[in-house]
Image (spheres, helix red, strand yellow):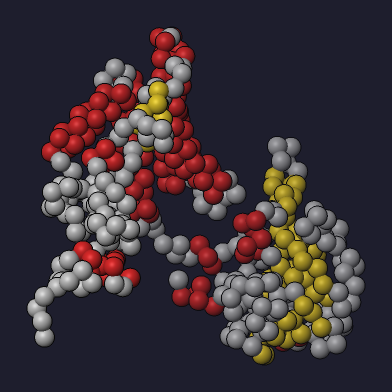
Amino acid sequence: MSDKTGPGTAGPGDPAESAGSVFARSKHPVDTAGRPVKGSNVSAGGPDVPAGTHDGPEALGTPPHQTDSSRDPETTVMRPGAHGGGVTPRPPRAEDVDHRAERRAERLIAFWFMISVVGTVGFVITNFVGDKHKQYYTPCLGSALGMAVGGLGIGLILWAKRLMPHEHAVQERHAFTSPKEEIAVTEAEITSGFADTGLARHPLLRRTLLGAGTVLGGLVVVPLLNLTNSKPGKKLDHTSWVKGARLVTEDGRYVKLGDVSIGGIETVFPAIPVTAADGSVIYKPKTDLHTKADSTTILIRLPPGVDQPRKGRENWSVDGHVAYSKICTHAGCPVSLYEQQTHHLLCPCHQSVFDVRDGCRAIFGPASRSLPQLAIAADADGFLHARDGDYDEPVGAAFWERS
């Protein structure tokens, strides 16, 4: 075997070797004359091209990573150019040239910060002083919280729009490791940005922002303080029914003897007797949401001789009219499906069945106890009313008895 190399052979490391296969050319790209392409690995460190530079196209090579710190420093800093990079100042606003406009903007922003303070104070007052069973409670609580958060947010937005520098800045991607020079520039920009907020020049904004943020931070304590609220105790054992309260429908009609036919039902609520200034008694219907939650009652007229009252309840009904709580003793659903032939009440939620003839005893389904009965009577005018006042046992789900 000869060690000579001729024009038709290529020794190791010879650029002509790269003319053999695609894989060889990908490692040692050459032009049509067989010379190494500028910017290739072969030319790195050569006499023509300095090592580490890439001033020519890379044929079948791997492009540098976007975060490669060896790339052109121009791409790692904020700079103006044809591609939208850099800072573009925008036309001045009224606040930039008119001191009076600047003062108006400052007062407007301070106004929204004060709205936030008022909302936070209103939230705290409503939470601890408001009646949680009234219809106003939840809307007031939500409105106050919206004012607290919204006022602070609107104030900050107006601050950025009206008083902070108005410019369009674009910063291109930079290397993960910043030079010391860039770190110094960043610190200077942060310092300049703080000065641009105007906190030093606008003491009113500084104080109102500090006040709004401090008061808003107090909302974190409110849920913790709610843990100290007292337990409901025996409040769940009572409803809005009182002695002498008339039975009234949801549309405000008082129920009289004869209004309900045999086999018919009617949903009724309490109409509380109130003594007027002249000594007369008027009745105030209570059909609000809170009353409906525990005082809703179903009035049923049974045929003569069908009712089998329990011991001690012989006079709790009038002419076949019986009144029971409409709230199921299983999970609190409304019991409203009545079968005239069987005299059964059915709960549509979980199919509990109650026998109206036997004191609304639970005979099927998950309910474990009878529906509470309301003792009723009729006055001289025939109006039905609560004879003794409230139910003699808690209404609703059975677990309330264990509260």
Establish if 209 lies above or below 265: above
Residue visible at 68% across and 72% down?
Answer: 334
Q: Is residue 136 shown left or right of residue 152?
A: right
Foreground of the two, 38 or 85: 38
Foreground of the two, 244 or 71: 71
Q: Residue furthest left?
A: 3
Point out residue 190 in the picture as x, y percentages from the top left corner: 24, 32
Residue visible at 70% across and 55% down?
Answer: 287
Whether residue 175 is visible: no
Point out residue 327 in the picture as x, y percentages from the top left corner: 65, 72
Foreground of the two, 95 or 124: 95
Q: Is residue 165 shown left or right of residue 141?
A: left
Establish if 394 lies above or below 208: below
Residue visible at 71% across and 41% down?
Answer: 276
Q: Is residue 364 shown left or right of residue 164?
A: right
Give the quarter of the image for residue 112: top left
Residue visible at 53% across and 41% down?
Answer: 143
Give the quarter of the image for residue 240: bottom right
> Is the N terminus in the top left, top right, bottom left or bottom right quadrant?
bottom left
* Figure disc tally: 0
Establish if 222 lies above or below 346: above
Point out residue 352 in the picture as x, y percentages from the top left corner: 66, 84
